[in-house]
Amino acid sequence: MYPHLRLVVDPTAIPWVFITETIDKQYCTGILCGLVEYVSKSLNFSYEFVKELDGIGHELSNGSWVGFMGRILKDVRITFKTQSSVES
């Protein structure tokens, strides 16, 4: 088993990251993408980028966050996948 990371990114952060998607594949170009690809191969983990379109966000009166910060606080996790679950 090896870790699988979900990385939250701002899709407007060009040239750092530029994400395009098809029905079954995500393509990433830019400085951040190249760096993450290199590190993932070196440290043996897989990853996916999660786009946040609502900007940096802000805190609501109940203490929760929306936007980029809200996504990070709610949706950042590391899961473990076996090799066979990724290949199938």
Image (cartoon, rainbow, N blue to C red):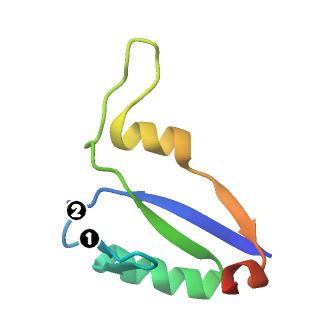
Residue that badge 2 annotates:
13
Q: CA distance from mark 1 to mark 2?
A: 6 Å
Q: Quadrant of residue 40?
A: bottom right
Side of 61 where 47 appears, left or right: right
Q: Position of residue 38 (x, y in %)?
A: 49, 86
Residue drawn where x is 36% and y is 77% of the image: 22
Marking on residue 67 = none
Side of 46 where 59 appears, left or right: left
Q: How many marks?
A: 2
Residue drawn where x is 36% and y is 44% of the image: 68
Q: Counting other residues with Cα less than 10 Å from the Cα at mark 1, is it few (<14), some (14-19), or many (20 or more)?
A: some
- View extreme (front): residue: 23
Q: Which SS class for mark 2?
A: loop
Q: Quadrant of residue 19?
A: bottom left
Depth check: 86 or 77 in front?
Answer: 86
Residue that badge 1 annotates:
16
Picture layout, residue 58 above or below residue 13: above
Q: Position of residue 67 (x, y in %)?
A: 34, 38
Q: Position of residue 61 (x, y in %)?
A: 39, 12
Q: Which SS class for mark 1?
A: loop
The amino acid sitting under disc 1 is Trp
The amino acid sitting under disc 2 is Ala
Tell me whether circle 1 and circle 2 mark residues in contact (CB < 8 Å): yes
Q: Position of residue 21 (x, y in %)?
A: 34, 74
Residue drawn where x is 19% and y is 73% of the image: 15
- View extreme (top): residue: 61
Residue drawn where x is 69% and y is 70% of the image: 3
Quadrant showing the C terminus: bottom right
